[in-house]
Image (cartoon, coloured by chain):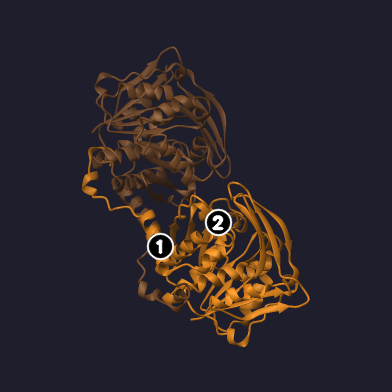
Chain colours: A orange, B brown
């Protein structure tokens, strides 16, 4: 089972109340791939960079075991660059600049060796490009897709066409409400499922994530972090780790999806501890296992002996 | 083990996008008592009403088995009355009016028979009155306390004095952030624990609740509701059900608190399905047990066979 990730490889600049970092390795495809490869060795990347993309960053991806045959270099343009400022509570953010550069003319072409990919991760991109990618994959077994407010507003038809071909949409709560035109998240998810994806995952930041698997709902907590250093990449790390985990299970049933959401949440909880993808470069299997165990402790409540509840107070009601 | 609830008994008017209801039986003590008595027969109420309090509402509380010896009637005043309008997404609300009436001069005096109460629920009230109540209880085993932004802003000293005598503070996320002057909820809870309560519960509405029990954290989901009809009383129902549940367990350890948070969440998820406390008047033990089982399905994820994860991708990191 091979994983294909498509998205951006970017140079990110981030200002947070804790510090500032410039031209970090970033982009949705970067985080998707660096998270997925923790679980599965065959991770193929399709993206474009420009003439200024540092060789050291290529090395980072290569040494992480990511297949870079699909990473195109546009020698006429610079790399997609993006600047963001996070406010004190980290839920609010301003975009300082977005220089599309090489991304403006990006047309994803899959190397021949990528066409048999089975798990496809469509990072946040123009839905026309997401469709182009799907057209080139022979027989995808599981398609995970991200999007954002810009495409919901500006290319709704193209987005709808993609959604009909997607197994699992991963969006944040504001995007889910906007896409479904519905403030209640449960109703919003049901409406999105009716658009195509039988699985919808709604990321709620510090409030965790909701998985809608056909009729069933799974509520995953957020790992309780006292210090979120840099939220960049958390959502793509979540989706990438899910994809990698699902590859190991060779299965996309409800149990595997519940587990995948926890592994996704665990890796996302690491990445926000440092600037950029730094924390994703040297995690150990033990650290991941411990974090997953912490998620279990966070949600576990013992069975109640119902005999202890057979009381007059309850019988009033019968 | 007997439960004492202190708070308001009110006549509530509520406008929601789904309808309008006037002069409903309401108030924190009402919801606390009606929820607690589902679990435990001895629920004692201390509150004041006025000359206009309907006899039918007294009957509702009495038939539910609530001890009303501590319900004072002020024949010179009307009952505390309160009007609220909820907006379309139900997270926003406007207070239309607050007529304190009999509540303005309320001085809670415990009947002699109430002084041996063991579980004490202090509903949202002036913290000076909450202190007066605690002064009259001989040997409280467990004190649960609610408060609100008004007291955090206007009577911070009195509130701090109450918190030093409280085992478990139950507040919403905005109140926790304000009380601790800290936007991060985990840090906020730790700061509040340092003020006295070894247990802090932060209610997050549609995002569930967080229990901070000494060093441990438990994250309870919200029950996924497609239709929240009237959010009034959900927080007090939560706290009242917790108190009743804990009485059945005769125990206040971490396991019991985790379970109590789930039972509190379950009863709160019922009360918002109708106007006022209507849904609390005829729940069956089976309905409660089914809702609790639904909370377990909502949070359950199977153990992962770690052998399936022993892959080259992970070994890159070691």
Instruction: Report the disc number at residue A292.
Output: 1
Residue at the image point whose x is 30% and y is 38% from the top = B244
Q: Is residue B79 left or right of residue B241?
A: right
- Outermost residue on the top side: it is B76
- Depth order, front residue of B109/B187: B187
Residue B39, visible in the rendered structure: no
Q: Where residue B303 sits: x, y (%)?
A: 35, 66
Distance CA(mark 1)–CA(mark 2)? 28 Å
Residue to which mark 2 is pinned: A188
Residue B203 shown left or right of residue B17 in the figure: left
**Residue B157 placement (x, y as % from top left):** 47, 25
x and y, in percent, of residue B174 in the image: 52, 39
Which element is circle 1 on?
helix
Confirm whether residue A16 shows in the render. Answer: yes
Does residue B210 sit above or below A255 in this rendering?
above
Q: Residue furthest bottom?
A: A112
Please state, as top left, top right, bottom left or bottom right, where the C terminus of chain B lies in the image.
bottom left
Please determine if labels 1 and 2 lie on a single subunit.
yes
Examine the image and state in which quarter residue B166 appears: top left
In the orientation shown, which residue stands out farthest toward the front?
A56
Circle nearer the viewer, 1 or 2: 1
Residue at left offset 67%, top offset 56%: A84
The circle drawn on residue B8 is none
Disc 1: CA contacts within 10 A as few (<14), some (14-19) or many (>=20) = many
């Amino acid at each position: 089972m091979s994983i294909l990730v498509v998205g951006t490889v970017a140079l990110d600049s981030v200002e947070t109340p804790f510090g500032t970092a410039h031209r970090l390795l970033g982009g949705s495809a970067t985080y998707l791939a660096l998270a997925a490869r923790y679980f599965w060795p065959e991770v193929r990347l399709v993206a474009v960079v420009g003439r200024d993309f540092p060789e050291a960053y290529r090395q980072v991806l290569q040494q992480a075991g990511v297949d870079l045959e699909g990473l195109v270099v546009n020698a006429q343009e610079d790399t997609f660059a993006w600047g963001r400022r996070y406010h004190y509570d980290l839920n609010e953010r301003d975009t300082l600049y977005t220089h599309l550069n090489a991304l403006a003319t990006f047309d994803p072409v899959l190397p021949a060796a990528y066409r048999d990919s089975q798990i496809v991760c469509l990072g946040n991109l123009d839905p026309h490009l997401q469709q182009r990618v799907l057209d080139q994959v022979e027989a995808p077994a599981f398609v995970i897709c991200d999007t954002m407010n810009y495409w919901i507003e500006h290319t709704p038809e193209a987005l709808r066409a993609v959604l009909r071909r997607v197994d699992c949409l991963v969006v944040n709560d504001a995007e889910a409400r906007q896409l479904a035109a519905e403030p209640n998240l449960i109703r919003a998810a049901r409406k999105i499922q009716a658009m195509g994806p039988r699985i919808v995952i709604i990321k709620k930041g510090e409030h965790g994530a909701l998985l809608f698997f056909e009729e069933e709902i799974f509520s995953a907590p957020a790992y309780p972090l006292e210090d979120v250093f840099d939220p960049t990449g958390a959502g793509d790390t979540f989706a990438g780790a899910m994809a990698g985990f699902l590859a190991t299970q060779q299965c996309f049933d409800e149990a595997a999806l519940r587990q995948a959401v926890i592994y996704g949440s665990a890796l996302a909880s690491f990445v926000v501890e440092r600037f950029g993808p730094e924390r994703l470069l040297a995690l150990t299997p033990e650290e991941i296992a411990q974090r997953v165990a912490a998620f279990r402790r966070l949600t576990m409540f013992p069975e109640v002996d119902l005999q202890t509840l057979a009381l007059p107070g309850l019988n009033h009601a019968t």
